[in-house]
Amino acid sequence: MPVSKKRILVVDDEPFVCDAVKMMLAFDGHDVVTANDAKEALETFDKSKFDLVITDFAMPGMKGDELAAAIKAKAPQQPVVMITAYAEMLQSSGKKLTGVDFLVSKPFLLEHLREAISTVIPDAKSKGGGKPGSKQG
């Protein structure tokens, strides 16, 4: 069951990934805005309100966790989900990803994004859950 409609900022330095995530989220009726780097994401974030930010980890200039921390500095309650091919490595390193509320491992399915959204946005729940965590799949 899809979650309720949200306004989501998707950040990835690979335009085709932004487009793919946007398409997946639009399938559930979400309003999706994309940015191709952290600088553009911060400018976009400053101009508008978002229910959720979804960012890639490995981006030139500023990594996804650094972007998440910068966003949380501006809006501490802002939910941030990070998608990455490095989820297992990041989790096993024990490094705290400041500002990241949920980690989704690449490759991922729409169902993984739905789980992340319903976990980090309390009123978006389509099924159980509630604690921030990670999804690997």
Image (tube, grey):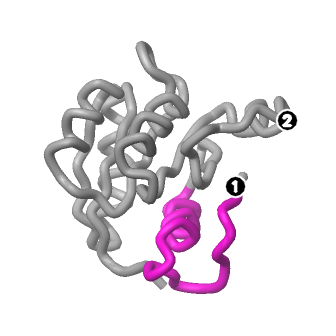
What label sits on residue 134 in the rendered view? Answer: 1
User: Distance of mark 2 from mark 1, alpha carbons?
Assistant: 12 Å
- Report the front residue among 130 and 86: 130
From the viewer's perspective, tell me whether residue 133 is left or right of residue 54: right
Position of residue 82 measured from the top left corner of the image (x, y, whole percent): 54, 44
Position of residue 84 measured from the top left corner of the image (x, y, whole percent): 59, 37
Vertical placement of residue 111 versus 11, above or below: below
Q: Residue at x 72, y 52 (%)?
A: 136
Q: Earlier in the sequence, mark 2 or mark 1?
A: 2
Q: Quadrant of the C terminus?
A: bottom right
The residue where tag 2 is placed is 92
From the viewer's perspective, tell me whether residue 21 is left or right of residue 86: left
From the viewer's perspective, tell me whether residue 28 is left or right of residue 81: left
Vertical placement of residue 43 versus 59, above or below: below
Position of residue 110 measured from the top left corner of the image (x, y, whole percent): 49, 62
Position of residue 100 measured from the top left corner of the image (x, y, whole percent): 57, 46
| Span shown in magenta | 109-133
Q: Residue furthest left?
A: 47
Give the residue type at disc 2.
Answer: Ser
From the viewer's perspective, tell me whether residue 107 is left or right of residue 4: right
